[in-house]
Image (cartoon, rainbow, N blue to C red):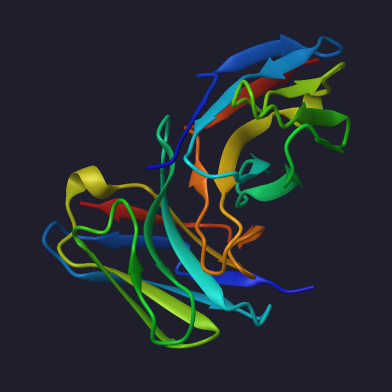
């Protein structure tokens, strides 16, 4: 079956430092890859998704490149802010009707001012 | 835009009790999902439904039932609540299994 493995948290950073959250996946097909973010008291929301290999997704200063050869989709941000404190989930889905998302274990990020 | 509404936000029950969570969406999406969220374990799929009256088991379906009687609603029943089941349950909907839109979650507390 499909699986997603990501950096185990918690991760604590100071404002202005750089972030990398590693994500690796296993699947037999070519998936769409996602990053979701969950702020306290809310449900997860889409940060961005990338349906094609070798393409990059980005939003709010976060970015990730779909690396098919390495089966990776690492999340990066050059300079984090306190408001980025949240749980980040990497996920994959197949491009057919009724497909489900498979999530990684989540990475809790805390950014100190 | 649409919204996913989960009720109740907190559900307190006794061990062995049958407990039901409800979810409504007004996106007019075909597919709906129930995920369980445990700290450090991420989101694990319990049940999903690709259309009205359809049910598909996820990885964690044992001990749960689900019902999709109409397109806009999807309910989840814990058949016999156990203390190790205390978690947050998240409902979501999507078009063609792509981007999921989540509710705020329902926390189950078993006493």
- Residue A47 location, quadrant: top right
Direction from residue B34 to residue A87 in the image, left or right: right
Quadrant (top left/top right/bottom left/bottom right) for the N terminus of chain B: bottom right
Q: Which of B51 and A46 is in front in this view?
A: B51
Direction from residue B77 to residue A41 in the image, left or right: right
Q: Nearer the viewer, residue B40 or A100?
A: A100
Residue sticking out furthest to the bottom: B70
Direction from residue A14 to residue B24 in the image, left or right: left
- Residue B58 location, quadrant: bottom left
How far across and down, in percent of the image, does residue A82 sit? 79, 24
What residue is rendered at 61% in x and 58% in y? A95
What residue is rendered at 34% in x and 55% in y? B108
Residue A66 sits above or below residue B12 on the image: above
What residue is rendered at 71% in x and 11% in y? A13
Residue A20 sits above or below residue A32 on the image: above
Disc tally is 0
Residue sticking out furthest to the left: B16
How far across and down, in percent of the image, does residue B92 sit? 55, 63
How far across and down, in percent of the image, does residue A88 sit? 63, 33
């Amino acid at each position: 079956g499909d699986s997603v493995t990501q950096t185990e948290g918690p991760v604590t950073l100071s404002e202005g430092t750089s972030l990398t959250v590693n994500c690796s996946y296993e699947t037999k097909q070519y998936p769409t890859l996602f990053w979701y973010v969950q702020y306290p008291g809310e449900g997860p929301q889409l940060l961005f998704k990338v349906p094609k290999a070798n393409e990059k997704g980005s939003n709010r200063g976060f970015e990730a490149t779909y690396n098919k050869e390495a089966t990776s989709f690492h999340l990066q941000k050059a300079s984090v802010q306190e408001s980025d404190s949240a749980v980040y989930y990497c996920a994959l889905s197949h491009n057919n009707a009724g497909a489900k998302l498979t999530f990684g274990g989540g990475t809790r990020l805390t950014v100190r001012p | 835009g649409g919204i996913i509404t989960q009720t109740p936000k907190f559900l307190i029950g006794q061990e062995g009790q049958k407990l039901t969570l409800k979810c409504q969406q007004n996106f007019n999406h075909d597919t709906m999902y129930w995920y369980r969220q445990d700290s450090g374990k991420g989101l694990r799929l319990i049940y999903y439904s690709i259309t009205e009256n359809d049910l598909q088991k996820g990885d964690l379906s044992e001990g749960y039932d689900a019902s999709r009687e109409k397109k806009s609603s999807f309910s989840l029943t814990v058949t016999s609540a156990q203390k190790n089941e205390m978690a947050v349950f998240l409902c979501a909907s999507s078009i063609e299994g792509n981007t999921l839109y989540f509710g705020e979650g329902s926390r189950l507390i078993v006493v």
